[in-house]
Amino acid sequence: MLITGTFLDEISHDIPHQNWGRKEWDKDFRSMREIGIDTVIMIRCGHRNMMTFPSEVLSRKENAFLPPLDLLELFLKLAGKYGMDFYFGGYDSGRYWANKQFESEVDINLAVFDEVWKKYGHYPAFRGWYLPHEVGRNTGSIIPTYARMGRHCKQLSGLPVLISPFISGAKGVNQFAGELRTATGISVAEHEKEWNAIFDGIREAVDIVAFQDGHVDFHELTEFLNVNKSLADKYGLRSWTNSESFDRDMPIKFLPIKWDKMLLKLNAAEAAGIDKAITFEFSHFMSPNSCYFQAHGLYNRYREHFYPELFAKREKQLLLNQSA
Amino acid sequence: MLITGTFLDEISHDIPHQNWGRKEWDKDFRSMREIGIDTVIMIRCGHRNMMTFPSEVLSRKENAFLPPLDLLELFLKLAGKYGMDFYFGGYDSGRYWANKQFESEVDINLAVFDEVWKKYGHYPAFRGWYLPHEVGRNTGSIIPTYARMGRHCKQLSGLPVLISPFISGAKGVNQFAGELRTATGISVAEHEKEWNAIFDGIREAVDIVAFQDGHVDFHELTEFLNVNKSLADKYGLRSWTNSESFDRDMPIKFLPIKWDKMLLKLNAAEAAGIDKAITFEFSHFMSPNSCYFQAHGLYNRYREHFYPELFAKREKQLLLNQSA
Amino acid sequence: MLITGTFLDEISHDIPHQNWGRKEWDKDFRSMREIGIDTVIMIRCGHRNMMTFPSEVLSRKENAFLPPLDLLELFLKLAGKYGMDFYFGGYDSGRYWANKQFESEVDINLAVFDEVWKKYGHYPAFRGWYLPHEVGRNTGSIIPTYARMGRHCKQLSGLPVLISPFISGAKGVNQFAGELRTATGISVAEHEKEWNAIFDGIREAVDIVAFQDGHVDFHELTEFLNVNKSLADKYGLRSWTNSESFDRDMPIKFLPIKWDKMLLKLNAAEAAGIDKAITFEFSHFMSPNSCYFQAHGLYNRYREHFYPELFAKREKQLLLNQSA
């Protein structure tokens, strides 16, 4: 099960930025391409008053700050250059979570989708939409939120819509808290029941579901993956897995995962018949260009395992360079 | 608004040390100089039983341990070598915060100031003093603490005295806690009232005030900066900004800030008419020599923005070296 | 007091993995050897359902996952190649701590010891055993736990058994918690009383005790080290110190320690007449190959202090290479 897609974690609210410019992003897209990544997903185009591109809508309605670099344009160009599909992630005001402001969250997103499609829809790499409001259960108004946003994107462009929910499992803790586990992990039966209801409500608005694979114990993962796959099949959704490349078991939050764990999760996804694996996310946690050098290790272990000949060739070249 | 000064975070109580020796510090001072830094401020000369130089006073009165390297001497020599002004930061016993031991905290600092001025005052780079007891509000006995220490420094040397308070804002949380925000951020009016009282009480003892700029939301910063500037003007204090180069919005504490945020804060300081920008701090968070590689990115983005020609020239040279 | 031993932190439950393969581990063993390390201790062979080698016992009884690389074999070969003694660390189910399941924890470990001695006992570098159940006080059934496991190892192989307890001191906090200190640090007298009882109960089952040196304040360490040494002498145990190379005083957990602190602790151990210093652990916190670049600094400071001529020679060679 190869990883063929990755999120682009701009704008992040919990992973420190690497402060990359045009040159560094170009280099990282090339590294993605070299291990077979053909899909990149901008996780969100804006968060609170920060944004990835100079949006008139967000400037006016959310008092968002103009960014020094238009990352949306840069990512679309790089995706085109390296032959990748780009998915555009919507806006997260922060109010949806804090105050359950469903109507206004959808309204602002529809306006952003219109603006973005008009200004950036002509890029050939623009191939899909991502709805960034991640949930684990059928809480609040998530069904109409997904449904209204997804339908709008599809009517606008005819392009597929992706969501990446989480499993409300034993590791589903707040990312700012100290503990690693919650006592109230969801059962497989509850998970199935709630996502059956959600999928039923969004089936014409959403095309692809990529559940995050990091919130349950490794021995529970297969069972949840099987449920996710059969539910998606029932409602005609495509099943991807979002195989997280950071480690949820450590007191330092968000450092690269141990290769052994990643491989376990990819093998479980393959056994469940999942269509495609994406990851959150390459640039911090799996890239040979990451500021976290543990990611370089993960990249090397991944290459060594899945591309042993290419890995050996590169190692040989490095030795030749050293002795030259 | 260029950054022309930085703290030297020795001794730190919350940022892990980089374990640099003479050579690494020399290299980093050169990097500072290359982006226009002319002022370095040792944040504190000692903390609890650790110290940056072999102080007889602290050895005797605080049972502090002799350090393997005299960082005070090293920093004074390097500041001289690279043409910078050095500010000496006082001692923090830890007891001032825990037990409000105001009298003893001042007494031990006056003895340290005497010792340091006698032993190190002849270095031409010794150009000012820094009082390390940072506060956000007019609590306890901060006025006489600042006033007695500041007056002593000025009588001893005639050199300026600097403080770097914080704004007791929405992000003013304990650095060891998990949460990022407090419900009890100070209002602009309260902040103005309390700092009016403090400035009134310290005006002949302190010369420069460099408020930290990281404890309030980005959209609130301009208003607070304007108040800080007008209060400082009213009492004849110089206004600097301490533009923090670490990110206060992340679950990992104290990693480099995203360039977009740093630029927002520098622009706000410029608009408020602030005299000079310093940062906490270059060596961990903005340096091309930092152990945190996100800092290398921040350094490159800063150079690219403020020194586009120099940045382009360096990039070109790197390309030439690679192809050679 | 030179560091001549290190733990190998596989499998870790609190330090993010570096994702090293065969080549990286070989390089790191060579770096260990270069600064005089002659002893390596695998901290545990398995934790919950993760393991370092393909154990039939753990696969069958604990449903543990097969690892992609047999680290136990790799470490034994590398220890042989570089002339080091290898200590094998037992299995930690996680249940001993959560539910005080003493009998089952011992049973599973005895089966693992048998399996390992049969399969790997022929490696010449296999020179001892490590019991991974670390405690600070005489709580629960630690005496029979240590005694049964230690006796079994010795009967099996005749090789020495090592434990590395902690001092239940002021810094003895949960590694996932935010705070740095507890109000209930143990007194020297209580510590002596409880470890007197433990040593009395394990004296024929355990040969070496290497107390961790990071849970007490620096000014308290000498007194605890003296007690540890005299107790060990009384019961015929060898005294090592486990001089921790990570910093317990920072909000980011588990980054390299400041050199000044490490040197203080090594000097205190030397003064107490401790036989040998090991560290937890070289590869993350002191290695020139670590993903944490602060560790490179610690390595350089250590070399500069203990091997000034070798350090100078290496620095000179680096300069020559640069100018060549």
Image: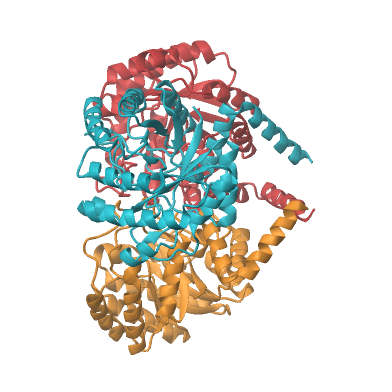
Chain colours: A red, B cyan, C orange
Q: Above or below — where is B218 with respect to C318?
A: above
Identify the image quadrant of residue B324.
Answer: top right
Residue situated in front as seen by the camera: B216 or C207: B216
Q: Residue at x 28, y 30 (%)?
A: A138
Residue B148 left/right relative to C304: left
Q: Above or below — where is C204 with respect to B91?
A: below
Percent x, y of residue B62: 32, 63
Residue situated in front as seen by the camera: B6 or C39: B6
Q: Above or below — where is B254 with respect to C25?
A: above
Whether residue A271 appears in this view of the structure is no
Q: Residue at x 67, y 49 (%)?
A: A311
Percent x, y of residue B26: 58, 50
Whether residue C52 appears in this view of the structure is yes
Residue C182 left/right relative to C247: left
Percent x, y of residue C158: 46, 87
Q: Residue at x 34, y 74 (%)?
A: C107
Residue situated in front as seen by the camera: C307 or A62: C307
* Marker count (numbered): 0
Identify the image quadrant of residue A31.
Answer: top right
Q: Above or below — where is A9 with respect to C119?
A: above
Residue A104 left/right relative to C117: left
Percent x, y of residue B241: 40, 32
